[in-house]
Amino acid sequence: GGEVRISCVRNPDGVALTVANTGRPFEERKAGGVGLENLEARLALWPQASAGFSLDGQAPWTVARLQWTPKEAVCNPPG
């Protein structure tokens, strides 16, 4: 068992998606991880936006973050 938390927040830069879980403990990223390399390659090909991805541990949580920033003004946060 474990717990999963998912959040998606609109911010001044675009949208931030965070997925955290207490399942398998976080391990430092090993070179050559196919899944994460594939994700990063696909994000780099996204023509409408730039995106950043991070994965880290905040015991007991493993936290994945994706920041999506449009290249043109397609979202205007309330202000």
Image (cartoon, grey):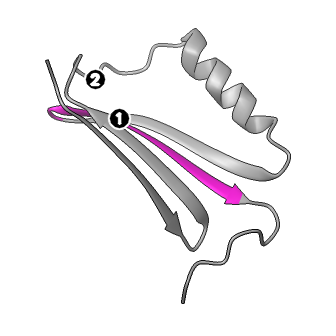
- Chief secondary structure of the magenta portion: strand
Amino acid identity at mark 1: Asp
Compared with 4, 69 (above or below) is below
Indicate the quadrant where residue 6 lies.
top left
Q: In the structure shown, which secondary structural element does the residue marked by tag 2 occupy?
A: loop
Q: Give whichever of discs 2 and 1 has the lower sequence position.
A: 2
Q: Determine contact: label 2, label 1, CB under 8 Å.
A: yes
Q: Is residue 32 visible?
A: no
Query: In the rendered picture of this protein, how many numbered marks are placed on residues?
Result: 2
- Residue 65 lies within the magenta run: yes
Report crowding for label 2: few under 14, some 14 to 19, many 20 or more residues within 10 A (C-alpha).
Answer: some
Circle 1 residue: 56
Indicate the quadrant where residue 60 lies.
top left
Say which of 47 and 59 sits in front. Answer: 47
Q: Is residue 17 visible?
A: yes
Quadrant occupied by the N terminus:
top left
Q: Position of residue 41 (x, y in %)?
A: 72, 27
Q: In the structure shown, which secondary structural element does the residue marked by tag 1 occupy?
A: strand
The magenta segment: 59-69
Residue at screen point 43% across, 20% down? 29
Residue at screen point 52% across, 66% down? 10
Residue at screen point 53% across, 13% down? 31
Q: Position of residue 56 (x, y in %)?
A: 35, 35
Residue at screen point 61% across, 68% down? 13
Q: Position of residue 61 (x, y in %)?
A: 22, 34
- Is 20 positioned to the left or the right of 43 in the image? left
Circle 2 residue: 26
Say which of 44 and 16 sits in front. Answer: 16
